[in-house]
Image: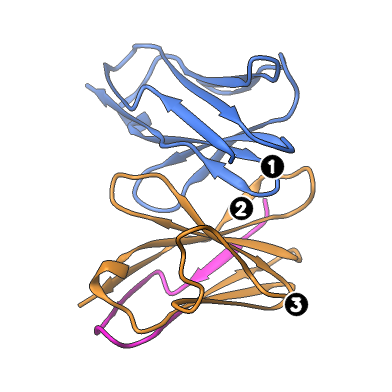
Chain colours: A orange, B blue
Amino acid sequence: GAVVSQHPSRVICKSGTSVKIECRSLDFQATTMFWYRQFPKQSLMLMATSNEGSKATYEQGVEKDKFLINHASLTLSTLTVTSAHPEDSSFYICSAFKGKHDEAFFGQGTRLTVV
Amino acid sequence: EDKVVQSPLSLVVHEGDTVTLNCSYEVTNFRSLLWYKQEKKAPTFLFMLTSSGIEKKSGRLSSILDKKELFSILNITATQTGDSAVYLCAVGGNMLTFGGGTRLMVKP
């Protein structure tokens, strides 16, 4: 199967700092990647759709100035949590469809803790 | 707005039991329905369903889709403690929309 690599897997940062999370498709090109957030014991909530070469599409209620998404190439999307606060602590996961009729492949997820 | 609803929310069974998990959906531009198993980290893929009435099987797990009634079921037979996890249903239209998950606990 296809591989999506997400880094880092775990990060602890101080309030007010910014954190960048990378999502790479290792063996396929992904024109679109998706960023999800998951709170404990809850399902995955779509935050935004990352489009290569254009602006990301954010879901309602997601602050685009706080969660900056850059999809600079066909294999890399980054999510930057700016001015992080403790309430941003969560599990963030990226995914990408390999092809039109394929399943979505997930990164390993990033557990962010803001202290 | 796309919507995916899973039931039950949680389930506790004993080893050897058979369970059926449900997923109903309302999405525009349906492309596929996917089942994932999530333990401690990222979800792992189980099945992708695109056509009605065709059962997909993998060992003790099987799943089927009904595109007319807009639902899918995931069956697990002869459950084992290792099946304990959250099972997520996701429907792919223009993006993946996830249901709330079913938390399954299998007791020895």
Of all residues, the one furthest to the bottom in this rendering is: A17
Give the spatial CA distance, label 1 vs label 3.
22 Å
Tell me the quarter of the image containing the C terminus of chain A. Answer: bottom left
User: What amino acid is labelled 3 in the image?
Assistant: Gly
Give the left or right position of residue B52, taking residue A83 as reference.
Answer: right
Give the left or right position of residue A69, taking residue A113 as reference.
Answer: right
Give the spatial CA distance, label 3 vs label 2.
21 Å
Q: Which residues are magenta?
A: A1-20
Give the residue at x 59% y 39%: B2
Q: Are marks 1 and 3 in contact (CB under 8 Å)?
A: no
Q: Position of residue B22 (x, y in %)?
A: 48, 20
Q: Give B90 or B56, whichever is nearer the viewer.
A: B90
**Mark number displayed over residue A53:** 3
**Mark number displayed over residue B18:** none
Subunit under mark 3: A
Disc 2 target residue: A105
Disc 1 target residue: B93
Subunit under mark 2: A
Mark 1 packing: few (<14 Cα in 10 Å), some, or many (20+)? some
